Amino acid sequence: AQSVTQLDSQVPVFEEAPVELRCNYSSSVSVYLFWYVQYPNQGLQLLLKYLSGSTLVKSINGFEAEFNKSQTSFHLRKPSVHISDTAEYFCAVSDRGSTLGRLYFGRGTQLTVWP
Amino acid sequence: GAVVSQHPSRVICKSGTSVKIECRSLDFQATTMFWYRQFPKQSLMLMATSNEGSKATYEQGVEKDKFLINHASLTLSTLTVTSAHPEDSSFYICSANLGGVKAEKLFFGSGTQLSVL
């Protein structure tokens, strides 16, 4: 079975500051890795994913995450945050051999960006 | 992009009553839908996989007679919490698989907050 740990339940930062949301996972098999974002009163949206290839993946709005197999981590980073980045962020893993929808989620990190 | 509509967004009910939650794929057909629940400060946990035209597959520890899932069409799956009790109070969220093996094919509803008094 897989498990996901998001070490920080809340991360408050000021606008234009850098941020890192941490995610570690445990699995006995190879996995796909995902970050989802949930804005207030909206559904989960895929932010970025690692399936294969380059271990550094980037989103269109400036976030990036790096898959580190040795440390079993997939931390999310952004060099300069905006107030509009305020949201709940979920890290998730999926067994490469299982149905796509069988995602295992972390408990989420609430990112709050202050002006 | 593809949208999944979940209704209601919030429901309060008395203990012993049943509550139905709907999950609709608005602009695509979803042969597979998934139901998750989330307790405060905890992870989203997969409850069951709903397949159109067949019985749902429940995760270990999830009571299938308690959480009835119906996927009668390619655009609608429903979750009914039967004889709800306060311990069933939780955040329920559905997702629908557009198909394929890439993550962008999976879309989530906005969730339903169930409170059982």
Image (spheres, coloured by chain):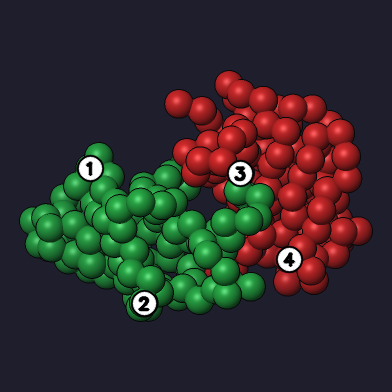
Chain colours: A green, B red
Amino acid beneath label 2: Ser
Cα–Cα gap, marks 2 and 3: 31 Å
Cα–Cα gap, marks 4 and 1: 37 Å
Q: Which quadrant: the N terminus of chain A?
A: bottom right
Q: Nearer the viewer, mark 2 or mark 3?
A: 2
The circle drawn on residue A70 is 2
The circle drawn on residue A61 is 1
Q: Is the residue B76 above or below the residue A11 in the image?
A: above
The circle drawn on residue A75 is none
Question: In this figure, which residue is indicated by the disc labeled 4?
Answer: B88
In percent of the image, x 75 and y 55: which residue is there? B48
Amino acid beneath label 4: Asp
The chain to which mark 4 is attached is B
| Residue B5 seen from this side | no
Mark 3 crowd level (few <14, some 14–19, many ≥20, 10 Å Cα): many
Q: Is residue A100 left or right of residue A84?
A: right
Cα–Cα gap, marks 1 and 3: 23 Å
Q: Are marks 1 and 3 on the same chain?
A: no
Residue at the extreme top: B27
Q: Nearer the viewer, mark 3 or mark 4?
A: 3
Mark 2 crowd level (few <14, some 14–19, many ≥20, 10 Å Cα): few
Question: In this figure, which residue is indicated by the disc labeled 3?
Answer: B95
Q: Are marks 1 and 2 on the same chain?
A: yes
| Label 1 element class | loop
Image coordinates for residue A58, horizontal then vertical, percent: 26, 48
Q: Is residue B8 left or right of residue A87?
A: right
> Dividing the picture into quarters, in which one does residue B58 lie?
bottom right
Cα–Cα gap, marks 4 and 2: 39 Å
The chain to which mark 1 is attached is A
Q: Which quadrant: the C terminus of chain A?
A: bottom left
> Dividing the picture into quarters, in which one does residue A74 lie?
bottom left
In depth, the one of A23 and B75 nearer the eye is A23
